[in-house]
Image (cartoon, rainbow, N blue to C red):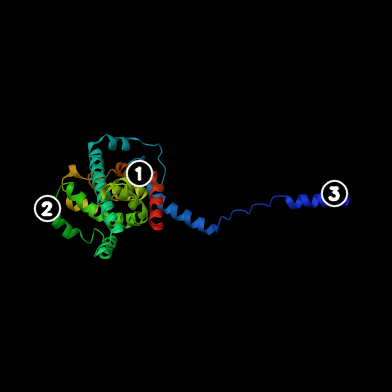
Amino acid sequence: MTATSVAIQAVGRNNRPAKMPREKWGSPWVYLLALILITICITPVLYIIIGGFRTNSQITQDPSGWPAPWQLANYGDVLTGSEFWTAVWNSTLVALATTAGAVVLGVMASYVIARYQFAGKGIMYSVFAAGLMFPVTVAITPLYLLVRNLGLVNSLGGVILPQIAFALPTTIIILVPFLRAIPKELEEAASIDGTGRLGFFWRMVVPLSLPGVITVGILAFVGSWNGYMLPLFILNDSDLYTLPLGVQNFASQYSVDTARVLAYVSLSMLPALVFFSLFERRIVGGLTGAVKG
């Protein structure tokens, strides 16, 4: 072998592309812990869903067993009954009204806090932030007295208005960073073009803060859908029950029929699970934008 060929081979070896470093997957203990936590969270949900496909005798004989055979009658009885769909309609109406009120009022209040300077601005923002640490269980007694004085007991309006109030702190805390991050140059350019403050708000602010608006809307909807304490104190008529109260009422009526109760519970939590799963990325994206802002 000549010196020339040896040099060519050496150059070829030197010109070979370097191997990409292997991706580090991290510690396997982290994945094991995550798997354990996921199993703990999912197992009760799967048990309830699968239990709806069993009979009462199967549940009594083997509480942790699989349906043998699978029964569809439990879910069919719930879906064909008017009680379930009445509760679904009430929950949908309350959740949509709560979401609309929290988003509209939250965007307007957040816009003022984020874009304008006035006395008491910091105090106002601190009050809304403190609302995150004020659960509905603490205020349920004075809140019930206030709703009663307004004549809204045993009405969906008596549930919607307080839920909007309790959803506003989260809405404002998330939206203020979005609105604060909008460059002031855009507002100045809009004012030069003759756009007023309201026009800038609807044409520029709302579209630019849309990820945050979607996030707070989803959180308000899911929170209202799963609300239990407030409807329990406000609503007395079974025709006005939301799904959480419908589950309690159904369980008390059919306490002996465990399989049918499990089917009702499964169908009650299914809409919230599907809704939250579909918009999970929206929620994460909106919260990320709020942190960056």
| Residue 285 on image: x %, y % | 41, 50
What is the spatial separation of the Cα atoms under label 1 and label 2, in whole angstroms? 33 Å
Q: Residue at x 47, y 55 (%)?
A: 34
Which of marks 2 and 3 precedes in the sequence? 3
Most foreground residue, 192 or 217: 192
| Residue 39 on image: x %, y % | 44, 52
What is the spatial separation of the Cα atoms under label 3 and label 2, in whole angstroms? 97 Å
Amino acid type at image mark 3? Ser
One can see residue 268 in this view: yes
Which of marks 2 and 1 precedes in the sequence? 2
* Circle on res. 92: none
* Circle on res. 150: 2
Query: The residue tagged with tag 3: helix, strand or loop?
Result: helix
Q: Quadrant of residue 173?
A: bottom left
Residue denoted by label 3: 5
Amino acid type at image mark 1? Phe
Which of marks 1 and 3 precedes in the sequence? 3
Q: Is residue 78 left or right of residue 54?
A: left
Disc 3 + disc 1, Cβ < 8 Å: no
Q: Is residue 46 left or right of residue 245?
A: right
| Residue 167 on image: x %, y % | 27, 54
Disc 3 + disc 2, Cβ < 8 Å: no
Residue 68 lies, with reference to residue 214, above or below; the image says above
| Front tag of 3 and 2 | 3
* Circle on res. 275: 1
The residue furthest front is 192
| Front tag of 3 and 1 | 3
Residue 50 lies, with reference to residue 188, above or below; the image says above
Most foreground residue, 24 or 191: 191
Amino acid type at image mark 2? Leu
Residue 29 lies, with reference to residue 71, above or below; the image says below
